[in-house]
Amino acid sequence: MSRIIALIIMLVPGIIAAYGIKLMRDMFFGIQASWLPALWLQFVLGFIMMALGVGFIGGFLLHRDRKNNKVQKRFKTAKK
């Protein structure tokens, strides 16, 4: 059950990042989303969505690998 929950946690940001990439790609081809008023706004929103999605996935994986002690020395947190 915990693996299914982890999969869902990883899918949601992945879908958001993929939609952000789609928005940016559509802006380059001049296809405007009906719910956005300008192409530049579409690109900015797509970039933000892509950055947040990829950042969340990267942070999730780094946290999991730190917990399992599978990271290099430079990525380990300093113990006080």
Image: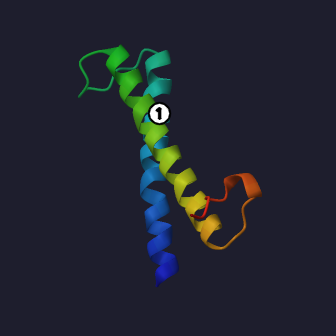
- Asked if 58 appears above or below 24 in the picture, the reply is below
Q: Residue at x 58, y 67 (%)?
A: 64
Residue 18 left/right relative to 77: left
Name the spot of residue 65 as percent of width and height, x first.
Answer: 64, 66
Q: In this view of the protein, which residue sits in the foreground, 66 or 80?
A: 80
Displayed quadrant of residue 34: top left
Find the residue positioned furthest to the bottom.
1
Q: Residue at x 76, y 58 (%)?
A: 72
Name the spot of residue 53 as percent of width and height, x first.
Answer: 46, 46
Locate the C terminus by quadrant. Answer: bottom right
What colouring does the structure picture have? rainbow
Q: Count of labels shown? A: 1
Q: In this view of the protein, which residue sits in the foreground, 56 or 77?
A: 77
- Asked if 27 appears above or below 52 in the picture, the reply is above
Q: Residue at x 68, y 54 (%)?
A: 75
**Label 1 crowd bin: few (<14), some (14–19), many (20+), radius 10 Å:** some
Find the residue positioned furthest to the front.
80
- Asked if 36 appears above or below 80 in the picture, the reply is above
Q: Residue at x 32, y 19 (%)?
A: 41
Name the spot of residue 43 as percent of width and height, x first.
Answer: 41, 22
Query: Which residue is identified by label 1?
Result: 22
- Asked if 10 appears above or below 1 in the picture, the reply is above
Name the spot of residue 19 as percent of width and height, x first.
Answer: 43, 40
Find the residue positioned furthest to the right.
72
Q: What's under tag 1, amino acid-wise?
A: Lys
Residue 34 left/right relative to 65: left
Residue 72 left/right relative to 47: right
The secondary structure type at the circle numbered 1 is helix
